[in-house]
Amino acid sequence: MAYYRPVKQTIDGTISVNITALRKSGYLQTNTQVSGAINYTSNTTNITTRVEVQSESDEYLTLKYEWKGEEITQRIGIVKRPSNLKRGSLYFFVCPYTSKYVRNLYLPEGVTQFASNYAFIPPIYYPSQTHSKQYKPVGQCFHIEDLLNELTNTRTQTHYKGKETKRYKRIKELINKYNDASERSLYDLINFCKP
């Protein structure tokens, strides 16, 4: 009997709304009505949609979007909590299905309304969760390469007043991690290919 393994939906190929990004864009202002739009296009899953965001306060916001030919309006609650660093406040969405406080809401395939990842069974996975055991060290190498590119593209200063900079220490640490991951991936590949 054949075993059916469903395709795991990942966060990369899912429409999402992040409350930190909305706050930085100026949507969560007290006593101010703000509206705008978020456009989504994805090469991997043919996502092309526009989500209109309206906020009249910092207590809720309204999302208007067209999904599968249907016009949908969804009102989502927002909660403000003091930061544990004692500096300002943090904002959270209130998931319409689980009532949990979350920073991201998702609109995966087969669902018509935004919700937190806790509301979906099976959940939406991170790309690294879908990799096989043999691929994980290779995937880690790719991830470290991306981080190294970010760090080395912006600035090349390695020392300041005779001491190593924090950025340079981070680069050296990532290079060591990359070398370890490379050795593991090579070792796994050799063992996997043995008859």
Image: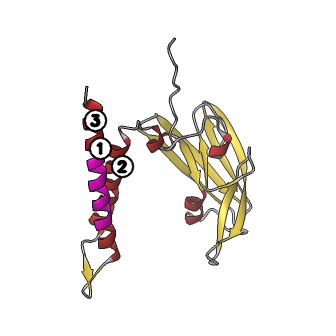
Question: How far from the left and from the top, in percent, is residue 181?
Answer: 31, 51
Q: CA distance from mark 2 to mark 3?
A: 19 Å
Q: Quadrant of residue 132?
A: top left
Residue kind at label 1, given as amino acid type: Ser
The mark nearer the N terminus, 1 or 3, is 1
* Residue identifier under label 1: 185
The mark nearer the N terminus, 1 or 2, is 2
Look at the magenta stretch and give its main secondary structure: helix
The reply to whether dot 2 and dot 3 touch (C-beta < 8 Å) is no
Give the structural element (helix, strand or loop) at label 2: helix
Residue at left offset 55%, top offset 60%: 21
The answer to whether one can see residue 187 in this image is yes
Disc assigned to residue 63: none
* Residue identifier under label 2: 140
The reply to whether dot 1 and dot 2 touch (C-beta < 8 Å) is yes
**In the picture provided, is 17 more to the left or to the right than 187?**
right
